[in-house]
Amino acid sequence: MNDANPVTLTCRTNIEGDVTWKFHGSELEDVDIEENIQQNGLNLSMSAVDIPMLGKYSCWRREEMLSSTYLLLEAEESDSLSCRAKSYDCNFSCVWIDKRQTAVRLEQTAVRLGLGRECSEGGKTCDWVSSDQKDGRFQFELNHLLSPYTEESTQLEVTAEVIVELSLLRKTKRFYLRDIIEPDSPSIVRCQEGKEDLNVTIDAPSSWSTPHSYFSLEHQIEYVLKDDGKTGRSSSVLIPKRISKLRVRSRDAVVLSAWSQWTAWKNVITGKNKLCKCKNKAKTCCPELPSEYLENCLGINELLYFRVISPEEIGYIFSAAPAKDFGGDFTYSYDKIFLVPADPADGCSDLEDREIIQGQVVLVERGAGAQESLSGLRLLLCAKGPTCEEAGGKAVLIADNAVDNDSQYLDMITDGSTAKPSIPALFLLGRDG
């Protein structure tokens, strides 16, 4: 930690005459470092600089302090400064982070950044930007005057000065703006099903430069296939139809910048069934729907309420929860529609009362308790079939008379059936069932 190179400090004053140097407010003759220091007029020369000699030096004339200087140890070089631009607009951000610092040392750390040659050369007119540390990071926003429409010929110069206790690190990074471009994540707007492919509409992030016809982005889509769960990637917005979910990232199409972060995964909703899941736009990618469609939707964890008008002895308001894995969306309201018990009650074979079911809501029975688990399983399987739909029912209510079952929805057992009934299926759970 010893520096054999001599150091000279100068008292910055225009007033002639003798001055007195102090170290941390004490005259040099009163501290233990005097033997390595020699004063010559306004100058203070030091040899064999060591840690005890680091700190604040000030020069005085009687009771007036004329100037002060901090003598610090030059720290080891570290690549702790990184910069990023979200677009070609007039600002970019930089982060200084050093994982080697402890929490205590970070509290004793000061960092400032300056842009331009005046800062890199230590000029007095440098416009320094300071920041407080948060979670071990110092975040900075810097402004530049580059035109986004012209070719870059001059590099940006960012200088960081870092003081950690009695050590000083000074570092300058030079780069072109195009080299630090990393867009924000794009937006997945819709997934429109075509004859052969799925057409994905993607919007540039709001922070990206405009017009987008000039500042173009290229997108990459990552998707998961429904059939085998394998992952694929595409640079085209046309991707295979049978996929379960997708996510997207973007980069500058001209300079091939760094890729943005991936968007969150979105579940792909296609076909006519389960379009009400599109109410959760943050988690689903859906086709374009009429504006009023989703307003009428009953989604997962949302209850359908209905009132029995007659017979009066059961004239209560009941609630039903939509089936999670099968059946269509419930998007309508009905006034004075009939609730017709299925015959047979489990609805697993041809219905005897098809004529009166036409255009009405069908009530089927699920079973009651663990001892009927086998028949309950059979009903779960056959309830997924088209029996009630073929009879012309508007919807199916499946009554579950297990009192302790108050789940919001039921996970259905997969039976491998390819039948996809489009009418809504809802469960009467717990006491209502």
Image (tube, rainbow, N blue to C red):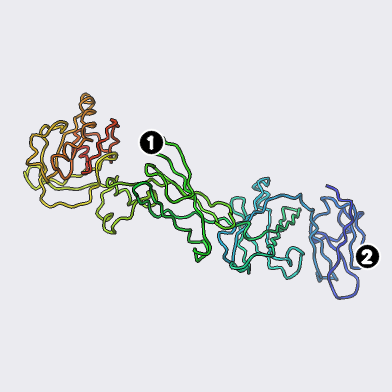
Look at discs 2 and 1 and give the one toward the viewer. Answer: 1
The location of residue 287, given as percent across then percent down, is 34, 52
Q: Alpha-carbon neighbours of circle 2 within 10 Å: few (<14), some, or many (≥20)? A: few
> Looking at the picture, how far across and down is residue 144, in whole percent?
63, 67
Q: For residue 125, which numbered disc appears in the image?
A: none
Left-right relation of 355 to 148: left
Quote the CA–CA distance across marks 2 and 1: 85 Å
Of the numbered discs 2 and 1, the one sitting upstream in the chain is 2
The residue indicated by pointer 2 is 40
In the picture, measured across the screen, residue 176 lies left or right of residue 339, that is right
Question: What percent of the width, then of the height, locates residue 101?
Answer: 68, 47
Foreground: 417 or 279?
417
Q: Amino acid at mark 1?
A: Asp
Taking 205 as reference, is 157 left or right?
right
Foreground residue among 137 and 345: 345
Instruction: Find out whether the residues at labels 2 and 1 contact each other: C-beta distance under 8 Å.
Output: no
Q: Amino acid at mark 2?
A: Asn
Residue 227: mark = 1
40 is higher (above) or lower (below) than 74: below
Q: Secondary structure at mark 2?
A: strand
Displayed quadrant of residue 177: bottom right
Q: For mark 1, give the secondary structure.
A: loop
The total number of labels drawn is 2
Q: Quadrant of residue 141?
A: bottom right
Give the residue drawn at x 34%, y 49%.
194
Residue at point 43%, 41% (across, down): 224
Q: Residue at x 11, y 34 (%)?
A: 351
Q: Residue furthest front?
A: 196
Q: Residue at x 12, y 36 (%)?
A: 342
